[in-house]
Amino acid sequence: SIADLARLHPVSGGVYVYTKSHLSPLLGFLGGWSFFLAKSTSAAFLLHTVNTFFCTHITLLQGVSPLLLDVILILLWTSFHLGGIALGGRVQYLFAAMKFTPLIFGLIAAACTFDQSNLTAGYSTLTSSMLSSIIPVCLYALVGFELICSIGGFIENPEQNIRRSILIAFTTVSIILIVFQILLYGSLGSQLGMQPEPILSIGSKLL
């Protein structure tokens, strides 16, 4: 639905534009601000989680308040985006590269320590009540692809490319997430839920 709406409205604005055009300006206003506040809050929370991780593992940062680091990084990140989409894009490439490093390591380490019996045991203990709590988390992990619509006006030939971009991006991320989670569970089994840092746990297991 979002891919088709993006093709019909190849302009910047995403969800705000679609809601305003097809429902009402008031709902567009409410939807746009709700989306902005929700994404800003989740990004800030993610940043805080990353800061807490580094403060725990890097000795030099252990005396620094994670909240102070949060403020500094949020201001820095905001300044990158205020500098324009070109600068923001280059920063995104840098962070994407940083995210791919542990992801690739995790995939390789989990594949090397994969144990089929973990999947069999996990499937046999799965209940319908467990599924009701698992499925929303799985779906939430895939939310975010719609952000590409918010810069639709910057995509070259958006009438042809924006729908394709959204579908390819969504499919690619979905496949990577599914394979990663299967390998992760296959490596750690039921211990996965008790590991605050599963990548480090898989690394320790591999070594």
Image (cartoon, rainbow, N blue to C red):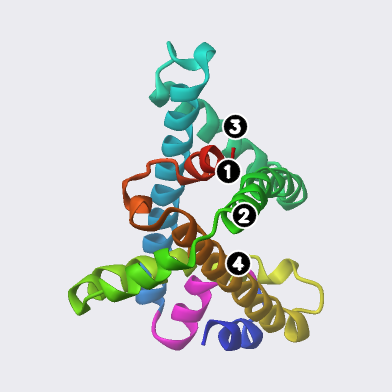
**Residue at the spot of label 3:** 76
Q: Nearer the viewer, residue 191 or 169?
A: 191
The span picked out in magenta is 12-24
In terms of secondary structure, where does tag 2 sit? helix
**Residue at the spot of label 4:** 176
Q: Identify the residue shown where x is 62% and y is 45%.
A: 102
Is residue 21 covered in magenta? yes
Looking at the picture, does residue 44 appear above or below residue 120? Answer: above
Q: Amino acid at mark 1?
A: Leu
Q: Identify the residue shown where x is 23% and y is 70%.
A: 130
Q: Identify the residue shown where x is 34% and y is 68%.
A: 122
Task: Assess disc 1: are there few (<14), some (14-19) or many (≥20) residues with their C-alpha within 10 Å of its C-alpha.
Answer: some
Q: Residue furthest right?
A: 156
Q: Which mark is residue 206?
A: 1
Residue 33, quarter of picture: bottom left
Residue 162, quarter of picture: bottom right
**Foreground disc of the pair 2, 3:** 2
Labels 2 and 3: the sequence-earlier one: 3
**Residue at the spot of label 2:** 112
Total tally of numbered discs in the picture: 4
Between the residue at mark 3 and the residue at mark 4, the CA separation in whole angstroms equals 30 Å
Q: Nearer the viewer, residue 99 or 114?
A: 114
Labels 1 and 3: the sequence-earlier one: 3
Q: Identify the residue shown where x is 63% and y is 88%.
A: 8
